[in-house]
């Protein structure tokens, strides 16, 4: 009755003598498991509430901006020479809203295995060069030096091309978001012993504490809540999506970080056959 009322301090003494003591041991194990589940549920519920508050704020701001600009255009309150700038601002704010919605929809599909991975072998140099080129402007805004270091020869990688691009884009963008006046180096190489392509993203940013590293893959988690109003990473879902996608590939992702020193993400995409074995051995 006490356990049913969420009192998980209950403990039954066991002297390991008979079946009743076995039952007591099982009961104590069950209570510990229920307590852990209850804590996790409460933790995730708190994260959900924080996310809803953040998402509401993030959506309200661009919607208010768009509404104000539309009213200004409707009543000719905006000078002719400023109309082009107003339309561009509305376009940017609309894209921001689309990113928020798409990240949530994408996460649910990935989490529930509703996506199909079209895995094939390709040269990872091509998407990595495109990503770095796309993100150079964002890096420059933070006065960061973004550099790509990969073999000039073909870097054969077995993965879904679009999802690989999504994984790498999210990690590199995350490094830019938390680095100012620093360096971000993206490295790619083959690990033939483990039949894998390995990608290392190292930055000299704000870094994370041990607790932050432990929680970084959780849905809605933001290692630095004070930056929730930054232009990118509004939903706190980017790294959760990355982690889930890498797991869906049968790959592996690791992170090492130190406060005020920087973070290093390492992603392993295994060759055809080896990824499947990795999954089955879990």
Image (cartoon, helix red, strand yellow):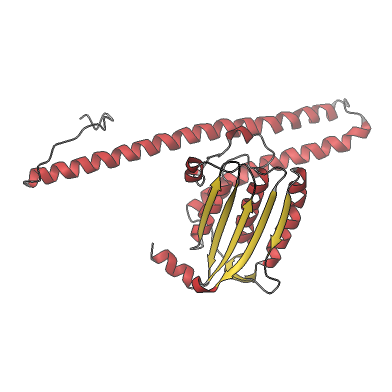
Position of residue 255 relative to residue 193, above or below, is: above
- Asked if residue 86 is positioned above or below residue 205 in the image, the reply reads above
Tell me residue 117's x, y (percent).
55, 63
Q: Is residue 67 above or below residue 203?
A: above
Residue that extends furthest to the right in the rendered view of this protein = 81
Residue nearer the viewer, 203 or 27: 203
User: What residue sits 60% from the left and 45% below the top?
Assistant: 261
- Residue 199 x %, y %: 60, 61
Where's residue 279, x and y in %? Answer: 43, 64
The residue most toward the left is: 18
On screen, residue 65 versus residue 258, left or right, reads right
Q: In this image, 127 relative to 261: left or right?
A: right
Task: Residue at the far front: name it.
Answer: 261
Q: Residue at x 63, y 35 (%)?
A: 227
Task: Report the residue at 67% width, 66% height from top.
Answer: 150
Which of the 4 image quadrants contains residue 6?
Answer: top left
Quadrant in which the C terminus is drawn: bottom left
Q: Is residue 153 left or right of residue 29?
A: right
> Relative to the observer, which residue lies in front, 215 or 200?
200
Where, quadrant-wise, is the N terminus in this rendering? Answer: top left
Count of picture labels: 0
């Amino acid at each position: 009755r006490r356990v049913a009322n969420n009192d998980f301090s209950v403990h039954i003494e066991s002297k390991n003598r008979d079946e009743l003591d076995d039952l007591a041991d099982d009961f104590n194990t069950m209570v510990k498991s229920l307590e852990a589940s209850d804590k996790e549920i409460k933790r995730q519920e708190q994260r959900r509430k924080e996310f809803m508050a953040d998402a509401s704020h993030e959506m309200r701001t661009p919607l208010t901006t768009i509404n104000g600009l539309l009213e200004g255009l409707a009543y000719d309150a905006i000078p002719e020479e400023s109309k082009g700038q107003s339309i561009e601002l509305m376009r940017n704010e609309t894209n921001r809203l689309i990113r928020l919605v798409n990240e949530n929809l994408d996460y649910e599909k990935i989490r529930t295995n509703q996506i199909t991975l079209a895995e094939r072998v390709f040269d990872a140099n091509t998407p990595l060069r495109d990503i770095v080129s796309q993100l150079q402007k964002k890096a420059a805004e933070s006065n960061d030096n973004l550099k790509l270091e990969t073999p000039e020869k073909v870097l054969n990688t077995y993965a879904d091309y679009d999802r690989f691009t999504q994984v790498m884009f999210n990690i590199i963008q995350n490094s830019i978001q938390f680095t100012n006046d620093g360096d971000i180096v993206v490295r790619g190489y083959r690990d033939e012993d483990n039949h894998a392509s390995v990608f290392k993203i190292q930055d000299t940013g704000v870094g994370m504490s041990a607790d932050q590293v432990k929680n970084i893959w959780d849905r809605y988690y933001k290692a630095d809540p004070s930056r929730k109003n930054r232009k990118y990473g509004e939903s706190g879902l980017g790294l959760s999506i990355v982690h889930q996608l890498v797991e869906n590939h049968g790959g592996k992702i690791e992170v090492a970080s130190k406060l005020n020193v920087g973070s290093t993400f390492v992603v392993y995409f295994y060759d055809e056959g080896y990824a499947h074995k990795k999954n089955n051995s879990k």
